[in-house]
Image (cartoon, rainbow, N blue to C red):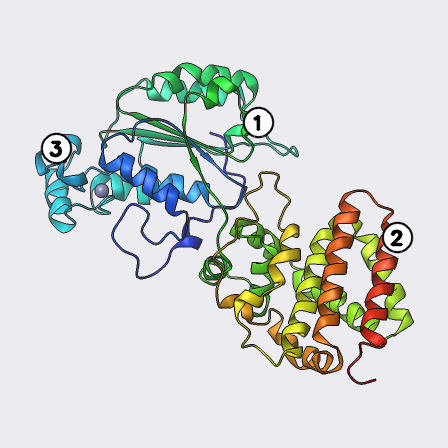
Amino acid sequence: MASDVSTDMTSSVTAAGAQHGVFDGLLGQQAAKDKLTGLLYSGAQGGAHLFLGAAGIGKRVFARAFAKAVLCAGGAAGGTVSVLDAVAHIADAVDAVSAVAAAPGRLPCGVCLPCRLFQNGALGDFLFIAPSGQSQRPAIPVDAARSVVDWFSTRPLHSSKKVCIIAQADHMTEQAQNALLKTLEEPPAYGAIILTAENPGMLLDTVRSRCSTTFFTGYTDREVEYILRNADAPPHESAIPLLTRLSGGNPGYAFGLAQSETFMSTRDELFGLFCGHLDGDPRATYMLQSFLEKNRERFAHFAGMVIFLLRDIWLLSMGGMGIRSGDDVGASGGASSGGGSDSGASGANSGDSGVGAEIVNADMERRLAAYGERFRPGALLDCIERVDETCSQVSKNANFNLAVNAMLVKISATLNTAYNRSV
Ligand SMILES: [Zn+2]
């Protein structure tokens, strides 16, 4: 079967102290949770589902959690599944009894046979499909779609349901999507099929119209920080605040950045050159320009970093870390770099309180505080605005070198002339 090509965040999003429920320990996405839980407890979990949202936002993690709950034979869903029901569905009656006794009313129960098999990746009533292949945009071929159709043609073995997840379903070829139409239209009574997709435009109208769509939106900074910090392989602690801000509310994007071994060293190089520029060192200015020129494809990303650097200096110039988040300027500019995705799920990063007031590059605090003493807060805000403007000019294909040069000259003039506190 096709292999799983992108980062699986299943264990990354697990939180402690969660309440009982289908999405125990999964942060955020309240609207999706409410909808899916409602479907489960009203017995309407079957049929075709489409989970839509940016890559890395956690659709797959939620799809797995939902699938596990659908497949569970033990939990008494809203009191509608009795021990007898459970016994009828699973091979081991003792399992069913102990499952219901152990966790009445809870889905998934975690102890019934389907739950345990699912946990070990050994439940035959669950099928996972994802694009495979080495190409830039690996596809899900028609053969994979046909295998799904075949798979649904036999009854479940251990559960009362069969669930198939097709991840990155927007990578299905047109032929594959057509092969799936009938199953999406009329899945067997025991069947549920979940498509996850980033780009609904790549799906046929006939596919979309047959699915019940659930939307996945951006996370708050606080949630992203939590997810990063509690991942199986968390990024280096000093990188987490910056990764969070650059993520635009998308933990998967932050993990992608963190996986680049050079993330922190590149930050150090960029910030070293930028600080040199602030100090009026012409060599640093020249090298900064070549650095940005060399990385012009990722200008939005690096501009976002510079905005957070300036924001840190601004916070420190205002007397430290106690500024309320209402004054937070960080959200305005840098978030635009959280892209790489075209689905517009970034920018939904609201409700961020408290965390926004702390400096992002805490490991550089002493050096940045020295700038904070030198520069006037208003001048720093002007510079942030200038970087943001330049970002938008570059995205509109302005002459790159001219735009960047003008930005650096303006920053230098703004900070190092009449505005300068120490003049
Ligand atoms: Zn169970």
Q: CA distance from mark 1 to mark 2?
A: 35 Å
Q: Which amino acid, mark 1?
A: Gly
The residue that label 1 is drawn on is: 201
Would residue 134 appear left or right of 187 to someone viewing this image?
right
Counting from the top left corner in percent of width and height, residue 303 is at: 73, 57
- Residue at image position (73%, 60%) is 385
Nearest the camera: 208 or 388? 388
The reply to whether residue 260 is in sight is no
Quadrant in the picture for residue 386? bottom right
Residue in the image at 63% along x and 71% along y: 361
**296 on left or right of 224:** right
Mark 1 touching mark 3, by CB under 8 A? no
- Side of 11 where 76 appears, left or right: left
Q: Rounded to the nearest whole Å, what is the CA distance between mark 1 and mark 3?
A: 41 Å
**Could you tell me residue 340's position as x and y percent?**
64, 44
Q: Which mark is residue 58?
A: none
Amino acid type, mark 2? Asn
| Label 2 secondary element | helix
238 vs 260: above or below: below
Please state if 316 lies on the left or on the right of 10 as rendered.
right
- The correct choice, above or below, for 12 with respect to 324 in the image is above
Tell me the residue that label 2 is attached to: 401
In the rendered picture of this protein, how many numbered marks are placed on residues? Answer: 3
